[in-house]
Image (cartoon, rainbow, N blue to C red):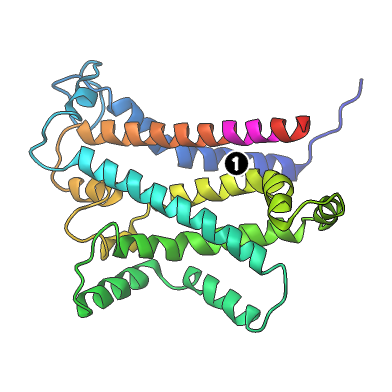
Amino acid sequence: MSHEKRTLEFYVLAAFFTLFVLFLYGPLSAILILSFQGETGGLTFPLNGVSLHWFANLFERQAVGDFGGSFKRSLVLGVMVMIVTVAVSLLAGLAFRRKFRGATALFYLAVASLVVPSIIISLGIGVVFQQIGFRPAWYTSAFGAHLTWTLPFGVLIMFAVFNRFSPAYEEAARDLGASSWQTFAHVVLPMIAPSLIGVGLFGFTLSYDEFARTLMTSGTFNTLPLEIYGMTTNVTTPVLYALGTVTTVFSFLVILATLAAILYVGRRRARA
């Protein structure tokens, strides 16, 4: 049995991909390993024993840093951003299926924040809140700043979804006597549900680890990315690595749960 000979381009791309994976996961693996340092271990190799001491230390009161509080704030903020991103992106996708006056200008206005530096948006929102007499906080100004980052992506994804969506399904439902709401709930929504789950995951992950747009808008209390950044200058134990490992595992669990939800929706739709 003859095999087709690999070209030079294949080996070049394979080498590039290998370097990319090493660059992406090499530092992550180092943090993962160092988070299992022994109780007397430090921030660098070699390991001085192996233990779960620093993971247990995460749940104790720290001299510096607020792990639990910052994680809860990032989690709640991510869920808030996720819900609003899904709702607004869906409504925008439905609205732009029909032409209306000012649609082009509104579209470019919606995605304009993608080309503006994140730190400028963060600074501008923080200054505006202070000028109008409101104190910046993670659940107000930071929430709005995160939406300027997640909504354009969500809107663009839903535009792509509805551009490929055939109106024949809706016409068939109406011919069978379904109302507009029934058509949306029983025909359109189940078909675009995997895309909505993807938009939700995208919005949550973008918000959960956003740093630049939170820097000037979080107010007195930090979110998790700001807390980790602030602690890099004053934490001298592997507890920071343990925190990085826990948050990374949490992110992967969110992704796996989302993929499971997409597969479940896809199977239900296939059976229907």
Residue at (36, 71) in percent of width and height: 121
Residue furthest right as drawn:
1
> Which of these two is toward me, 107 or 239?
107
- Placement of the C terminus among the 4 image quadrants: top right
Residue 171 is inside the magenta segment: no
Residue at (32, 68) in percent of width and height: 122
Q: Position of residue 269 (x, y in %)?
A: 73, 36
Q: Is residue 252 left or right of residue 121?
A: right
Region of the chain picked out in magenta, as a range: 260-266
User: Chief secondary structure of the magenta span?
Assistant: helix
Q: Position of residue 266 (x, y in %)?
A: 69, 35
Q: Is residue 102 left or right of residue 61?
A: right
> Which of these two is toward me, 140 or 119?
140
**Residue with the mark numbered 1:** 17
Q: Position of residue 53 (x, y in %)?
A: 19, 20
> Which of these two is toward me, 238 or 166?
166
Quadrant housing residue 48: top left
Residue at (44, 66) in percent of width and height: 148
